[in-house]
Image (spheres, rainbow, N blue to C red):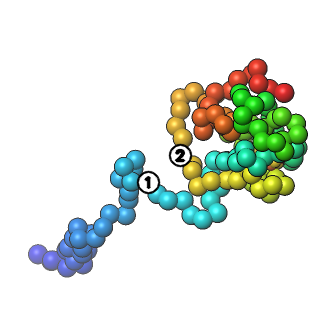
Amino acid sequence: MKIDIKGIWGALSSLKYLFQPPGTLRYPDVKKEAADGYRGFHDNDLSKCIGCGMCEDICMNLAIDMVKPKSEAYLNAKNGSGLIPRLDYGRCCWCSLCTDVCPVNSLKLTKNYVYVSEDMNRFIYTPGEEKLGKREKETVK
Ligand code: SF4
Ligand code: SF4
């Protein structure tokens, strides 16, 4: 009988993985931190946003609508239009043109990228409201 040394060695060598840390994460208990510069969901600092609408104008995917906020308290004194951008993640491709063009750097992309909902209408971000909320047609300009 011929002994398959190579095969036995191959099987035994796999035992080393028993003593190594796992290469996977116990998600959702442990989450992976996104790299610097990662293009996740937007954040808009309403204390800076002047409502100029340049983010809406440049968005090639028509993912941004300028809308009235639920409360005037969300507008700062320099917001001339009284409007703020609302983002639709059903359209956004995270190109970041909207953040590049924002003249006051209020609109930024964050490292947040996990959001789960069975309702596609909840993939909308209106600053001042819940992070991703339901589209409200009455607030459209
Ligand atoms: S990241 Fe690009 S696609 Fe998404 S809202 Fe901004 S400009 Fe539009
Ligand atoms: S987020 Fe920036 S570009 Fe968009 S309306 Fe506000 S200030 Fe203008």
Quarter that holds the N terminus: bottom left
Residue 84, position as x, y percentages in the image: 78, 38
Secondary structure under the numbered disc 2 in the rendered image: loop
Residue 81, position as x, y percentages in the image: 88, 36
Give the amino acid at mark 1. Lys
Q: Residue at x 78, y 46 (%)?
A: 49
113, above or below 34, in the image: above
Give the amino acid at mark 2. Val
Q: Residue at x 57, y 27 (%)?
A: 119
- CB of mark 1 near ligand 1 (< 8 Å): no
Q: Nearer the viewer, residue 8 or 141?
A: 141
Residue 23, position as x, y percentages in the image: 37, 64
Mark drawn on residue 54: none
Q: Nearer the viewer, residue 107 or 77?
A: 77
Q: Is residue 5 visible?
A: yes
Which quadrant of the view contains residue 57?
Answer: top right
Q: Label 1 to label 2, Cα distance in Å?
A: 10 Å
Q: Residue at x 56, y 64 (%)?
A: 35
Q: Do the residues bearing badges 1 and 2 touch, measured as CB atoms within 8 Å?
A: yes
Q: Nearer the viewer, residue 53 or 19?
A: 53
Q: Is residue 19 left or right of residue 48?
A: left
Disc 1 target residue: 31
Secondary structure under the numbered disc 1 in the rendered image: loop
Residue 99, position as x, y percentages in the image: 77, 53
Q: Residue furthest top?
A: 138
- First in sequence: mark 1 or mark 2? 1
Disc 2 target residue: 114
34, above or below 49, in the image: below
Quarter that holds the C terminus: top right
